[in-house]
Image (cartoon, grey):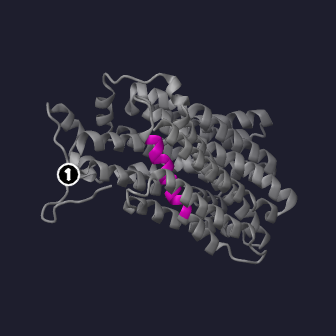
Amino acid sequence: MSTTTSTSTPATPISPATQSAAATPVLAPSLVRATGWGYYPVAAIARLPFAMVVVGVLTYVATVTGSVALGGLASGAVGVGVVLAGPFVGGLVDRHGQRRVVPVVGLLNAVAVALVPLVVGADATRPLVVVVAFLAGATVPQVAPLSRTRLVTIVGARVVPEKRVSTFSHVMSYESAIDETAFVIGPVLVGVLAALVAPWLPLAVAAALSLTAVVAFALHPTASVLAAGHAGEERAPLREMVRARVLVVVGGAFAVGLFFGTTLTSLTAFMGEQGRGDEAGLAYGAMGLTSAVLALGVALLPRSFAPRWRWVAFGALIVASSVLYAGLAADASPIGVLLLMGLGVGPVLVTILSMASARSPQGRAATTMTLTTAALALAQAVAATVTGQLAESQGAASSMVLPLASAVLLVVLGLANVAVERRTA
């Protein structure tokens, strides 16, 4: 994202609402001038409920009931809710705009998440726990794809033409880096709050953020640009969403989600066997650190390094580092390998999400991005459940092979994407 401003004059946000009122929009020299600095912390914090709810439900249910199996089942129900409702909510956003839909979703999610500790604490039946967990996932605000859609629209409508290509690249890198950070901070925050205060606190924080940060994101002045863009826009037929060029990208996001879920859960089991289970979240943060840095660095890669080959090349790096991870000795530190993993994860995620944005059918940008993110969340939840069961029954070493399998799937889908691009060229 371009942040170039004059050194003599401070950056003054250009109100999208003011611009849309003019017959000819005033174009900004950079994205920050078009949005204002205040947008970015709001959009970043609003991502946390999504990043916290899967792990938060798993932690709370397993801790209170003493059943890891029920915790995993509830966590999986959250993921199913995300993937089933996500595209539907995205479609509503495409039709009615973020300002009308997202505040309602934030309110519903706050209620659903707050119900989880109430239902579990009341010794409710297993089906009721699963239903409430499903509702928490179905209503969780998916701010990341909505923010991408908003910023990409602003780049096209409010940034000077000569800066649009480079700014788009910076937007996708920045957004992916923020996603990486949220995916790391979310589980760490859940672990810290649950350990230091109470298992219910992470869910209470997530509910509060849905009511505050998510609503603030939805009502931010930048949403007015989207409202203007939706007016009179034609929408591609729904069948365009099941084209190979879209599905392969959604599959790639699913593979990344599998990698996240298998890595975090197997790492937790591995460090638990070392007697350091409470440090797993911090260790996982090592992968997030290099991943976020490399995600930002994607914008610096030469254009000759085509996105389809970035997917394959950095996916291969994840495979190589996963081999090292699977072979760690029982008393070894995983930090070095996790840092290496992050070098591949960041660029791959940026590439996949950039492709999802570029391949969105007309009028269905929010639907496409939400579906892509939902696939990642579902895979993460399912992978965490399966990996946890394997680690519990067979030991951590067995579960540490699963990230390698996820990485191989990621590369296979990357090669499939190369074939799809050649066929549709």
Q: 410 or 66: nearer the eye?
A: 410
Q: Quadrant of residue 331?
A: bottom right
Coordinates of residue 231 in the picture (x, y in percent): 31, 24
Look at the numbered disc 1 and give the secondary structure of its residue. Answer: loop
User: Which residue is the extreme one toward the right?
Assistant: 393
Is there any visible trace of residue 243 in the rendered image? yes
Name the residue at 40% across, 25% down: 96
Most common SS among magenta residues? helix
Judge from the rendering whether residue 262 lies leftward or rightward of residue 35; answer left or right.
Answer: right
Crowd around label 1: few <14 · some 14–19 · many ≥20 (10 Å) = some
What amino acid is found at the position of numbered circle 1 in the picture? Answer: Pro
Coordinates of residue 87 in the picture (x, y in percent): 54, 32
Name the residue at 40% across, 33% down: 98
Q: Is residue 246 shown above or below 172?
A: above
Q: Quadrant of residue 251?
A: top right
Coordinates of residue 223 in the picture (x, y in percent): 33, 37
Judge from the rendering whether residue 393 lies leftward or rightward of residue 207; answer left or right.
Answer: right
Is there any visible trace of residue 212 in the rendered image? no
State yes or no: residue 347 in magenta. Answer: yes
Name the residue at 37% across, 52% down: 169
Which residue does the numbered mark 1 point to in the structure image? Answer: 29
Q: 319 or 193: nearer the eye?
A: 319
Image quadrant in which the N terminus is located: bottom left
Judge from the rendering whether residue 418 lies leftward or rightward of residue 42; answer left or right.
Answer: right
State yes or no: residue 223 in magenta. Answer: no
Q: 282 or 336: nearer the eye?
A: 336
Which stretch is magenta?
A: 344-357
Name the residue at 27% across, 53% down: 32
Image quadrant in which the C terminus is located: top left
Q: Is residue 322 shown above or below 259?
A: below
